Amino acid sequence: MAFSVYLTGFSMGLSLIVAIGAQNAFVLRQGLRGEYVCLVCFTCAASDALLITVGVTSFAKVVALLPWLDPVMRAAGAGFLLWYGARSLLSAFRSSGALDVGASVAAPLSRVLLTCLALTWLNPHVYLDTVVLLGTISTQFEGEQPSFAGGAVTASFLFFFSLGYGARFLRPLFAKPAAWRLLEAAIGLTMWAIALKLVFLD
């Protein structure tokens, strides 16, 4: 049971984190440039780990005090995911953009880390994904929340370090707009699947 819950946390965490956004684009660019890749990846993943832990450990306690909060947050989360999935699918059909790496001079480490922290902690979607959505889903696994959180944290570390260090191999691929469109379509369908699970969760 614990391993299946771990895999659920892993798949949920990975599905939420792969969404294209400013943070992931920043990590991808740093990886393509080969600048401070390890520190940037660790900063993003460690931030996620902290927020996931807060969501999994605290959200259940709040729900115990306010039992009406779980269905409300589940409905709100499902609504957001349906909207986010629709936006991703729409982007998959309409987008014609590609990754623009640029050829700027390397920025100081302090500026890179501050930018990374700002893109992480000033993004309201980060809190919705890690604290609210993952926190809500974790309440369905009474006594197995650590396994769920461990899976989600593993997904975060795996994703960011794979993105950062694998970026050099992806450069030719993401120079093509079609690659972004395919990824956006996959993300949209995944978000809708998670929304349905939230709505029909027992």
Image: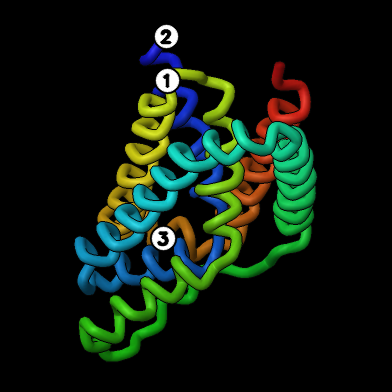
Give the Cα separation between the discs numbered 1 and 3. 42 Å
> Along the horizontal axis of the image, is 122 left or right of 195?
left
**Which residue is the site of mark 2?**
1
Instruction: Give the vertical position of 105 relative to 164 (above or below).
Output: below
Confirm or deny contact between disc 2 and disc 1 (CB under 8 A).
Answer: yes
**Which residue is the site of mark 3?**
172
Residue type highlighted by circle 1: Glu
Who comes first in sequence, dot 1 or dot 3?
Answer: 1
Give the Cα separation between the discs numbered 2 and 1. 8 Å
Where does the image place residue 39, in percent across and percent down from the top left?
Answer: 21, 65
Residue type highlighted by circle 3: Pro
Residue 5: quadrant of the picture: top left
Question: Residue, x 55% and y 63% (percent of image)?
Answer: 21
Where does the image place residue 41, in percent across and percent down from the top left?
Answer: 29, 59
Who comes first in sequence, dot 2 or dot 3?
Answer: 2
Q: Nearer the viewer, mark 1 or mark 3?
A: 1
Question: Residue, x 58% and y 22% (percent of image)?
Answer: 140
**Which residue is the site of mark 1?**
144
